Amino acid sequence: MSHEELLKGLRKTVEQVLKAPYYKKKLAQVDIHYPHDIKKLDDFWKIPLTEKEDLRQNYPFGLFAEPMEKIVRVHASSGTTGKPTVVGYTRDDIKLWAKIVANGLRRIGVTSNDVVQVAYGYGLFTGGMGLHYGCEELGALAIPISGGNTQRQLMIMRDFGSTVLCCTPSYALYLAESLEEAGISRDELKLRVGVFGAEPWTDQMRDEIEARLGIRAVDIYGLSEIMGPGVSMECLKGEGLHIDEHFYPEILDKDGNPVPEGTDGELVLTSIDKKGFPVLRYRTKDLTSISYGQCVCGHHGWTMKRVSARVDDMLIIRGVNVFPSQVEEAILTVGGIEPHYLIIVDREGNLDSMEVLVELSADSFTDEIRQLEELQESLEEKIEDILGLTVKVRLVEPKSITRSEGKAKRVIDKRQEKL
Amino acid sequence: MQQLSIFLENAKGRLAQVLNILAELGVNIRALSLADTKDYGVLRIIVEDAEKVAADLKERNCVVKLTPVWVLKVADATGGLAEILNKLVAEGVIVEYMYAFVEKANEQAQVVLRVRDEEIMKAAMEKLGL
């Protein structure tokens, strides 16, 4: 996209958001009253960032930029604290979203011959319906099985000959484990590729999933505030998630200043061409970096690195910043354990403590305490290496950590209960 | 002889749970030892048909392993165990762990030995005619 085209797109979004009184007031503060007040990118960058809090304040429909008669669907984010954030779509928005998802699927070789098992939740969460409409747009067969009911997932996967699986990475692992338990062999399945997202994961986790399910695993990214899944997605080259041209990305440091290309920071997104719920400079709370270029898959534009952490997931333990994904990376590098873990943070006296529960894998169980202790110590050392923080690793039995059918719960912070 | 080793998470009632499973499976435990650390334990047992019991336990989500061990008869007299051990040590055997039990049928004292090197133990046993 040329500079002029980008400006034109951003002006269109500004024109659209000005229809919502809240945005109108906000933009007036920086002297933007009309779309043509955006003469150069510097003008655009003056616009204050949009936060989740802005959405909450306008609950439920305050930021919709089209009259309700034009809105044909709503989705809402899970809203772990307080009220959910609600977004609305016009008929054109739904079509655009379907096209974007279809494009992403096409890039990883999905065709109208594919059978796609959509095991993301259907409902207010965008995952299920987002992928579903993308499949239909592409002409692929979408199985709207939604999340959960693992035994039925396995049966349908085998009997319907699913070739593509869409779910969270943690659920993919759980399905792999359940397949092994049910004695369903890889040869009975036609599964070829998995489209996994909705939670941060690591390359180590990807290797694990690919090995266990015998498929290629690609990452899909999105959030309801921007549109839903498909905002960006990996191609089979696996070198980052290609951001669709309908979204303009920026990366900002913690003070809100732009960082150079390739530097990590918070992803900020602006929608282009969205009508019902256009967003300007939305803070995603996701940490990544972006680069501009051309990929062999045909994508030309911005590509972001896999989101390995969310600002909100960050734990501060004894003053050290810790992301669950760092722990995941460490323990999966050591091996000898199942890829499931739980971080328990507590406070003993005035000191924070961090304990990591990991499941001993049946193959690496040895009868000798000495060797088990060695495994435990090597896990502790690896985590300490990466975090610079002493931790305690506790070996637990396989399958004793609760499995998730949606987004995995990786952290229990007991300090909050003690406040 | 194959010994069954079972990993036990340090959770309230976990040992009892596993013993209940063994009871349900109709398994009679001939000898038992429990190695424990602060966070977990390893239950080591001698049973009939250890391979089958191991498979049954795996099906019930237990982490199990078959470990080769040696069961030796020991004279039930002062210095009985010391005498055997001295001989084995002289042959270069290194003991990882051991526990004792009494065979009910003949009241014979026996020890279960786990050694570091199976080959050295085998040679020692042959040489000593045990």
Image: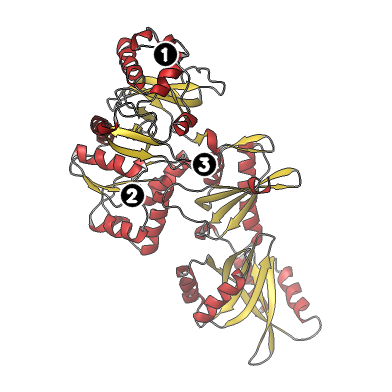
Amino acid bearing label 3: Thr
* Residue at the image position 52 percent from the left and 45 percent from the top: A332
Which residue bears the numbered disc 2? A119
Nearer the N terminus, badge 2 or badge 3?
Answer: 3
Render colour scheme: secondary structure
Which residue bears the numbered disc 1? A44
Nearer the N terminus, badge 1 or badge 2?
Answer: 1
Amino acid bearing label 1: Phe
Q: Is residue A99 left or right of residue A270?
A: left
Residue A125 location (% of width, % of height): 37, 43
Q: Which mark is in front, 2 or 3?
A: 3
Which residue bears the numbered disc 3? A81
Residue A331 location (% of width, % of height): 55, 46
How packed mark 3 is, by other alpha carbons closer than 10 Å (few <14, some 14-19, many 20 or more), is few
Q: Which mark is in front, 1 or 2?
A: 1
Q: Which mark is in front, 3 or 1?
A: 3
| Subunit ID for the residue under disc 3 | A
Label 2: which secondary element: loop
Q: Are marks 1 and 2 on the same chain?
A: yes
| Subunit ID for the residue under disc 2 | A
